[in-house]
Image (cartoon, helix red, strand yellow):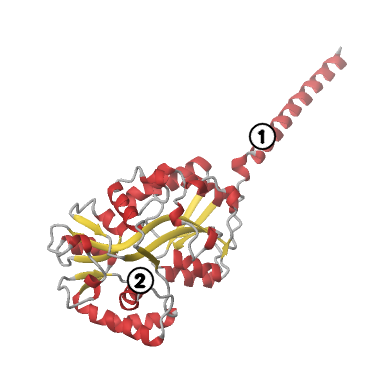
C-alpha cells in the first residue's frame, strides 16, 4: 500500500512538472511566433525628416498599436540632409523624407534602396499628377507624402494691385512695383525663381548667367523686407510686407491665425515642390518601414497631416476632408490648364558656387 501511495505521489509531482513545462514552452512559442514580435529585433523605427510633415498623434497611435518606438531627427534644409547622409552613408536611419531635387541627389549617391511596391497597399490611391517625374522616373525609390506650389502670400486687405494676377514681375521688377516683399531664404529656390524670370526654364546656368542672376537678386534686395519665408505671415499681417513669396502650405497654415491672408498663384508658370518618403540604403528595418507606410497612408491620417500643416494632400480622397478645399481646387484647376507650366526647384550651379554667390547677394 505504501508503495502504491509513493508511486501515486511521484506520478502527481511528475504531472505537475510536465504541465508547467508545457505551459512555459507554449508561452515561448506563442510570443516568438506572434507577428508583432517578429517584426524587428529592436522594434524601433528611425526617421529623418522635415518638421511639420507627420502629425505627432499618428506616431503615438502607431507606437501604441504596434509596440514599435519611432524616433525622428529633423533637418532644416535639403542641403543639411544631403551633407549628413553623405557623411554617414545613411546609417542609423530607416525612412528619409526630403524634397524632389534632394531625392535625385540621394539616388545618384546610392544612399537609397528601391521600393518593394508589392508591400505597399495604397499606391493606387495616389494622385497621378505627383508620380513619375524626372527626379525619380517610375517612382522606383520614392513616394510622395505631401506637395506644395510656390506662389505669393498677400493680405487681402492690403493695397496690392492686380491681386488675382500677380506674376514674377511683381517679385523682381523694381520699376513695376514699390511694395515691400518677403523673399525666400533658400538659395536654391531664390536662384531658380530669378533664373526663370531672366531666362525662362533652365536646367543649368553658365557662369555669365549665374552672375546675371546674382545681380538681379542684389537689385531686388532694395525692396526685400526680410529673407524669411517661415515668418512671412507675420510680415504680411503686420503690414511690413505686402507680398511674400512662399509655398502654399505656409500661407494656408497662417490663415488659421490671419484669415485675411490669401495664396495667389503666379501667372503663366510656377514651381512645384514634392516631399517624398524613401528607404535608406543601409536600413535593416524594412518590415517595420513598410508597416509604418501602410499605416500612415490612409486618407484620414493624410488629411490630418494636411489640415494641421497646410500642405496639399497626395490623394483625392484625403483632399475631400482638406479644410482648405477651395484653395486646393483652385490650385488643381490652375495647374491643369494647358498653357500653364510647372517646374521643379533644382541646383542650377554647383552647391559650393551657389553658397558663395548667395553670400554676395545678402552681404
Mark 2 residue crowding within 10 angstroms, few (<14) / some (14–19) / many (20+) = some
Q: Hey, which quadrant is residue 159 in on the image?
A: bottom left
The image shows residue 86, relative to residue 335, as above or below, that is below
Q: Is residue 15 left or right of residue 236?
A: right
Between residue 203 and residue 283, name the one nearer to us: 203
Furthest toward the front, the residue is 338
Distance Cα–Cα, label 2 vs label 1: 58 Å
Judged from the image, the secondary structure of the residue bearing numbered disc 1 is: helix
Between residue 228 and residue 137, name the one nearer to us: 137
Mark 1 residue crowding within 10 angstroms, few (<14) / some (14–19) / many (20+) = few
Q: Is residue 363 visible?
A: no
In this figure, which residue is indicated by the disc labeled 2? 189
- Number of marks: 2
Counting from the top left corner in percent of width and height, residue 92 is at 54, 62
The image shows residue 344, relative to residue 254, as above or below, that is below
Question: Is the Cβ of the residue at disc 2 closer than 8 Å to that at disc 1?
Answer: no
Query: Residue at left 52%, top 43%?
Result: 67
In this figure, which residue is indicated by the disc labeled 1? 27
Q: Is residue 347 left or right of residue 250?
A: right
Between residue 54 and residue 117, name the one nearer to us: 117
Between residue 213 and residue 335, name the one nearer to us: 335
**Which numbered tag is attached to residue 188?**
none
Counting from the top left corner in percent of width and height, residue 206 is at 41, 84
Counting from the top left corner in percent of width and height, residue 125 is at 47, 46
Amino acid at each position: 500500500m505504501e508503495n502504491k501511495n509513493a508511486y501515486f505521489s511521484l506520478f502527481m509531482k511528475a504531472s505537475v512538472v510536465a504541465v508547467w513545462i508545457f505551459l512555459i514552452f507554449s508561452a515561448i512559442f506563442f510570443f516568438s511566433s506572434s507577428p508583432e514580435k517578429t517584426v524587428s529585433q529592436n522594434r524601433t523605427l528611425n526617421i529623418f525628416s522635415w518638421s511639420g510633415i507627420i502629425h505627432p498623434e499618428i506616431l503615438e497611435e502607431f507606437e501604441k498599436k504596434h509596440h514599435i518606438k519611432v524616433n525622428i531627427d529633423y533637418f532644416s534644409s535639403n542641403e543639411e540632409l544631403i551633407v549628413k547622409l553623405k557623411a554617414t552613408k545613411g546609417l542609423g536611419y530607416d525612412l528619409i523624407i526630403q524634397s524632389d531635387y534632394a531625392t535625385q541627389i540621394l539616388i545618384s549617391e546610392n544612399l537609397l534602396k528601391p521600393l518593394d511596391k508589392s508591400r505597399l497597399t495604397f499606391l493606387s490611391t495616389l494622385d497621378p499628377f505627383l508620380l513619375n517625374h524626372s527626379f525619380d522616373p517610375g517612382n522606383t525609390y520614392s513616394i510622395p507624402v505631401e506637395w506644395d506650389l510656390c506662389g505669393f502670400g498677400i493680405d487681402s486687405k492690403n493695397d496690392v494691385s492686380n491681386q488675382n494676377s500677380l506674376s514674377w514681375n511683381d517679385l523682381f521688377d523694381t520699376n513695376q512695383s514699390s511694395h515691400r516683399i518677403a523673399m525666400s531664404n533658400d538659395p536654391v529656390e531664390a536662384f531658380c525663381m530669378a533664373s526663370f524670370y531672366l531666362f525662362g526654364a533652365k536646367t543649368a546656368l553658365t557662369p555669365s548667367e549665374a552672375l546675371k542672376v546674382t545681380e538681379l537678386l542684389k537689385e531686388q534686395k532694395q525692396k526685400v523686407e526680410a529673407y524669411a519665408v517661415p515668418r512671412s505671415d507675420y510680415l504680411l499681417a503686420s503690414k511690413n510686407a505686402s507680398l511674400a513669396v512662399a509655398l502654399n502650405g505656409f500661407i494656408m497654415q497662417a490663415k488659421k491665425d490671419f484669415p485675411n491672408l490669401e495664396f495667389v498663384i503666379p501667372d503663366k508658370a510656377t514651381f512645384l515642390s514634392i516631399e517624398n518618403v524613401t528607404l535608406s540604403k543601409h536600413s535593416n528595418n524594412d518590415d517595420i518601414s513598410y508597416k509604418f507606410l501602410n499605416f500612415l497612408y490612409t486618407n484620414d491620417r493624410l488629411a490630418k497631416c494636411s489640415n494641421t500643416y497646410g500642405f496639399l494632400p497626395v490623394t483625392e480622397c484625403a483632399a475631400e476632408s482638406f479644410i482648405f478645399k477651395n484653395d486646393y481646387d483652385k490650385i488643381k484647376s490652375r495647374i491643369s490648364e494647358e498653357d500653364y507650366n510647372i517646374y521643379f526647384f533644382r541646383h542650377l550651379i554647383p552647391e559650393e558656387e551657389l553658397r558663395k554667390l548667395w553670400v554676395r547677394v545678402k552681404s
